[in-house]
Amino acid sequence: MTFSDQTDIALEPAEVDSRVNDLSHNSWAKKHGRRKSVKIMGQEYGVSEVLEWRVRWGQRGMCCFAFIALVLYILSGGDQAGLLVATTVSSTIIFVFMGMLFYNNVSLAIMKRLFREMNVWIILILSLCNMIIDVVVPMNSFSPIMAFIYFLVVVGFLFMDATKVKTRAFIIGFGSLFTMFNLYCIYGNTLGTWGKDIVLLSYTILGEEYTIMKRSTKRSIFIQIFLFSMAGMYTLFKDKKMELMVFATGNIYRETGTALQSVADEVSVVGRRKSVTLMGQEFSVNESLEWRVKWGQRGMCCFGFISLACYIVAGGRNVGLLITVTVTSAIIFVFMGILYYKNTSLLIMKRLLQEMNVWSIVMLSLCNTILDVFLPSTPIFGPIMGIIFFIVTIGFIFMDAISVKARTFSIVYGSIFTLYMIYCIYGNTFGTWGKGIVLFKYTIQGEEYTIMKRSTKRSIFLQIFLFAMTGVYTLFKDRKSEYVIFATGNIYRETGTAMKDVEDGTFAIQKKLEKGQT
C-alpha cells in the first residue's frame, strides 16, 4: 500500500479553548463536548466519526484475521497447500483492514523520525533479504508468497508507530502475534523440517568446498529480527499510557542522564581543580586520574591495533602469532584496568544495564565464549580467543561508563572493535574457521539434522555487529562526546523528544506543514 501525502484530511485541528488544557494527552479519544481529539508532536487534532469507525474496525479485522492466519500457518507446517492457500487469503484480508487503519491516519513527521532509527532499517533490510532468499531459492511454490506476506507484516508492525489513532490493546495484540510468528519461523528452521539440504551459496577456498545453507541463514535472520523487535515489545508492555513511540529513541546526555542538555560545559574548572558532571552529579578530576586516563587510552589503542593485526595475519591457525595475540591482549587488559580504575560511573553503568541492546550483546558474546570453551576449533587457543573476545566486548560496551575519556580514544577503540567483528564474520564465512564442527545433532521424523558451529558463530558475530552499529554511529555523530553511546530514551509521541515536556522544534514545523497541506 502507499501512504498519501495528505494524511490529515480526516484529522482537522481541534478548536483550542480552556478545555484543551484538561485533555489527557495519553488518550486518543477524549470527548470535548461532542468532539474527540488527539495530541501528537505538540499539535491537537480532531478525530472525525469516519476515522473513529475505520480505526475501530481496522484494528478488529487485523487482529482477528492475523490470529486466524497464524493458526493456519502453524497447522500447515509450511508445506500443506490447502492451509497455505487459506493463510494467503486471510493475510490478504489483513492488508485490507490495515489499509482501513492507515488511510488518512498516518503522521509523516513520525514516519520520518522512524527512518532515522538504525534498528528500523536493520529490521527492514533483514526482512527484505528473507524475501529475496525465498524468491531466488524457494522451499516450495508458496515460499515467495509467504515471504512477501512476512515483509508486509514487518512493515505494518514497524510503522504502526506512525498511526495517529490506535488503542493499546490492538498494538499489544498485533505485536504479540508478530512475536509468535517470528518464534514459529525460528522453530521451523531449527526443529522443523524447513529448508533441509537447500544450498544458498557454494564456494571453494584453498581447494576446500564450503556451503552456506538456506536453513541456517533464515534461522539467523529470524533470530535477529526477533531480538531487534524485543526492545519495541518491551516498550509496548511498559508504556501503559501509550505516551511513547515503540521504535523511536533519543540519545541520553552524559551530563544530565536525560534527553535534556545542560547549559554548563561538561568539564569545568573550580579554582585549580577540574571536574566533570555526569548524570547530574559533579566529580573531581585530579592529576593522577588524568595521567592514568592518558596512558590507559594510549596503551589500549596501540596494543589493540597490534593485537588485531597479528590476529588477522594468524588466520586463526598460526601458533606463534596467536601467542603474540594472547600476550598483547593481556597488555590491553592491564591498560584497561588503568583506565577504568576509579574512573567508572556506577550511575551510567546502571543506566546501561537497562538497555535491551546491551543485554543482547553481552549474552551473545557469552554464548560465543561458551561455544569456544566446550567446542574449540583448536584445543588451546580456541577457549583463549573466546575469553579475549568476551572481555573486549564488555570493555567496549561499558566504555560508556568511563567518567573521563577522549573522543579520539572512543572512535579508535570502537573502530578496532568493528574491524574485529567484521574479520570474525569473514573468518566464519569465507575463511576456514570451524569447518566440519557439529554443534548439535538431532533427528526429526527419521531425518537427521545438524546445527554447525561455523554457521552459529557467524550468526552470533553478525548480530553483535548489527547491535553495536547504533553505538558506533553515535560515536561518529556526537562530535562533543555529550551522549551515552548505548543508552537511549523512548521518544514521546506528544513532543517528538525523549522528554515529555520539551518539544522538538523540527517536528513542530513538520506538523504545521502537514496541517497547511490539509
Image (cartoon, rainbow, N blue to C red):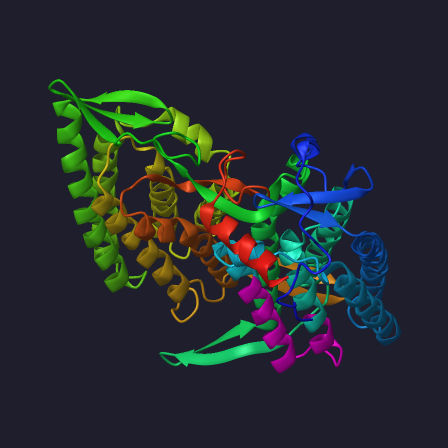
Q: Position of residue 309 (x, y in %)?
A: 22, 59
Tell me which residue sits at (83%, 62%) in the image.
69
Tell me: 312 left or right of 349: left
Q: Quadrant of the C terminus?
A: bottom right
Tell me which residue sits at (46%, 59%) in the image.
462
Residue 427 visible within the image: yes
Q: Position of residue 502 (x, y in %)?
A: 49, 36
Tell me: 19 left or right of 199: right
Q: Position of residue 297 (x, y in %)?
A: 19, 40
Q: Nearer the viewer, residue 307 or 479?
A: 479
Tell me which residue sits at (18%, 33%) in the image.
293
Q: Nearer the viewer, residue 96 or 89?
A: 96
Tell me: 65 left or right of 440: right
Q: Nearer the viewer, residue 349 or 316?
A: 349
Within the image, what quadrant is residue 446 found in? bottom right
Q: Is residue 130 magenta?
A: yes
Q: Position of residue 81 (x, y in %)?
A: 85, 76
What is the tally of numbered marks visible in this picture? 0
For the record, the magenta segment spans: 124-147
Q: Quadrant of the N terminus?
A: bottom right
When the figure is inspected, residue 210 is found, relative to residue 484, above or below; the finding is below
Residue farthest top in this picture: 271
When the figure is inspected, residue 482 is found, relative to residue 375, above or below; the finding is above
Within the image, what quadrant is residue 141 found in? bottom right
Tell me which residue sits at (60%, 70%) in the image.
130
Task: Label the magenta part by its dominant secondary structure.
Answer: helix
Residue 137 visible within the image: no
Q: Is residue 69 magenta?
A: no
Q: Nearer the viewer, residue 186 or 24?
A: 24
